[in-house]
Amino acid sequence: MFASDTLESTRERAAVLALMARRLRPWNQLSEAIEERESALALLEDLTTDSTRLFDDDDQTGPSLDELQASVLKWQQEGIRLMTVLDAAYPANLRMVHDRPPALFIRGELQSGDERSLAIVGTRKASEKGLAQAQEIARSAVAAGYSVVSGLAAGIDTAAHQAALEEKGRTLAVIGTGLHHNFPKQNAALQARLGRESAVISQFFPEQEARRWTFPLRNAVMSGFARATVVVEAGNTSGARMQARLAIEHGRPVFLLRSLLQFEWAQTYADDRPGTYVVDGGQEIIDHVERLYSKNLVLQG
């Protein structure tokens, strides 16, 4: 077990998973309910007699608490830590957003300084210019003492992670699968390295495979975790658009590279969405974020 874990805390974490496995909808209601009750075990017991208030009536069963506790212990032996909304170490930025997940599976370690982070996202099919821009922004973030957060996808995400590593900075991956999977396969080595040197974060059970619905949920966690989102390169059909929307919903600033204005979605955001900034490079982004947070002008979700 991790040094700070006890059998009691492990069972509490297993109870969070038991609640998740019963398909509570939506997850933010579960996070709020657990925090309000201050115990997943107590909430699980409460709901055995009154499940209609929170649970999907079609799926009232799931793995037993003992089975889930055994799984938590097995994952810990593999180096996967389970962190829940009951843990003081749950990321502070993420705790403030409405759609925070009840639990995070983490390979590696989170640090208190990771609260000072930027999410850098964009298309998988990036141009050479887009890759260079992602690298420049990641280097600027590291130089200013920020952690880089991205989604470990091909293209922009990979460029941001690699540039941060080259600068000996912290870069965290928030992935759209469980930690037992690599998506895309070609980033398996990069994922393993981030798990050793920084952290790889998932809100899904380790066995969860990639699905169309898992990636929007991943984007919500990435947006909530970071102080701001930077969209480097993304066409009208890119999933990075969703990250921009979620960041605005979370009250976090969104930075669009000026080259994005050729796309209708980006022009609409630049014209109509408060909290959206059009920028040319990394240092400009850092200056904006520093000014916004120093003056306490950012609404925290």
Image (cartoon, rainbow, N blue to C red):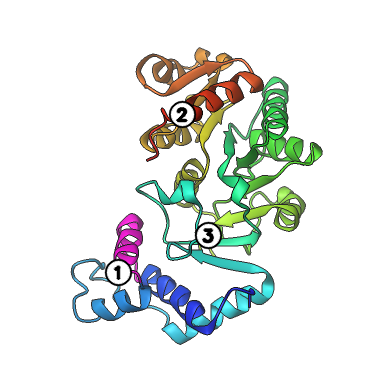
In the structure shown, which secondary structural element does the residue marked by tag 2 occupy?
A: loop
- The residue indicated by pointer 2 is 253
- Say which amino acid is labelled 3: Ala
Magenta residues span 22-38
In the structure shown, which secondary structural element does the residue marked by tag 1 occupy?
A: helix
Say which label, 2 or 1, has the lower sequence index. 1
222 or 93: nearer the eye? 93
Say which label, 2 or 3, has the lower sequence index. 3
- Say which amino acid is labelled 1: Arg
Label 2, residues with CA under 10 Å away: few <14, some 14-19, many ≥20: many
Q: Is residue 73 above or below residue 179?
A: below
In the structure shown, which secondary structural element does the residue marked by tag 3 occupy?
A: loop
Residue 37's label in the rendered image is 1
- The residue indicated by pointer 3 is 89
Residue occupying the point 64% across, 37% down: 146
Is label 2 or label 3 in front? 3
- Using the numbered discs, state the Cα–Cα distance from disc 2 to disc 1 in whole angstroms: 32 Å
Residue occupying the point 74% across, 49% down: 190
Residue occupying the point 73% across, 38% down: 164
226 or 127: nearer the eye? 226
